[in-house]
Image (tube, rainbow, N blue to C red):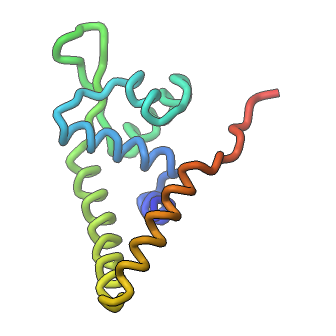
Amino acid sequence: MRRRASAAMGMNVTDMQALQEVISAERRGVLVTANLLATNLGISTASTTKLLDRLTASGHLERRPHPHDRRAVVVVATEHAHCEVRSRLTNMHDVMAQIAAAVPPESRGDVAQFLTALAAHLDDVEGPTPLRPA
């Protein structure tokens, strides 16, 4: 789902995750700095700088002065980004709701149990080892 949404918006999955992180933080009233974003995404600060450059150039994010620290910069999502993410995710959520509604009521408990077990085990599976420069 995340891959399709990011492709539809012309960005990679990490860029989409970053955009979602910023929007989510804004809703909670949290100021997002490049360091916070790097930590939350599990990427280097150098990668975060390139990511922010891409998302700023595409009109999805803006860098603004930090309101309490003159040395720092915060990252905010543009209105364009909010509208685009809302539109893409609303469409996907609508499809998911239609599919979920088609599951017979007597099967919903089994489906929920399966998805819960799957999610629990996927959290335990170690992902691929990140590539490192030689």
Asked if 107 appears above or below 46 in the picture, the reply is below
Instruction: Indicate the position of residue 118 as horizontal and vertical percent values.
Output: 52, 64
Q: What residue do we see at 50% from left, 56% from top?
A: 120
Q: Is residue 77 left or right of residue 132?
A: left
Asked if 81 appears above or below 93 in the picture, the reply is above
Q: What residue do we see at 39% from left, 72% from top?
A: 112
Comparing 95 with 77, the one in front is 95
Q: Is residue 33 left or right of residue 2?
A: left
Q: What residue do we see at 27% from left, 65% from top?
A: 87
Comparing 68 with 11, the one in front is 68
Asked if 5 appears above or below 16 in the picture, the reply is below
Instruction: Indicate the position of residue 67 as horizontal and vertical percent values.
Output: 17, 17
Q: How many marks?
A: 0
Comparing 35 with 112, the one in front is 112
Asked if 89 appears above or below 41 in the picture, the reply is below
> What is the quadrant of the C terminus in the image?
top right
Determine the residue located farthest toward the right in the rendered image. 134
Q: What residue do we see at 43% from left, 62% from top?
A: 5
Instruction: Indicate the position of residue 10 as horizontal and vertical percent values.
Output: 47, 57
Quarter of the view holding residue 116: bottom left
Q: Is residue 44 left or right of residue 115?
A: right
Quarter of the view holding residue 9: bottom left
Instruction: Indicate the position of residue 91 as horizontal and vertical percent values.
Output: 30, 72
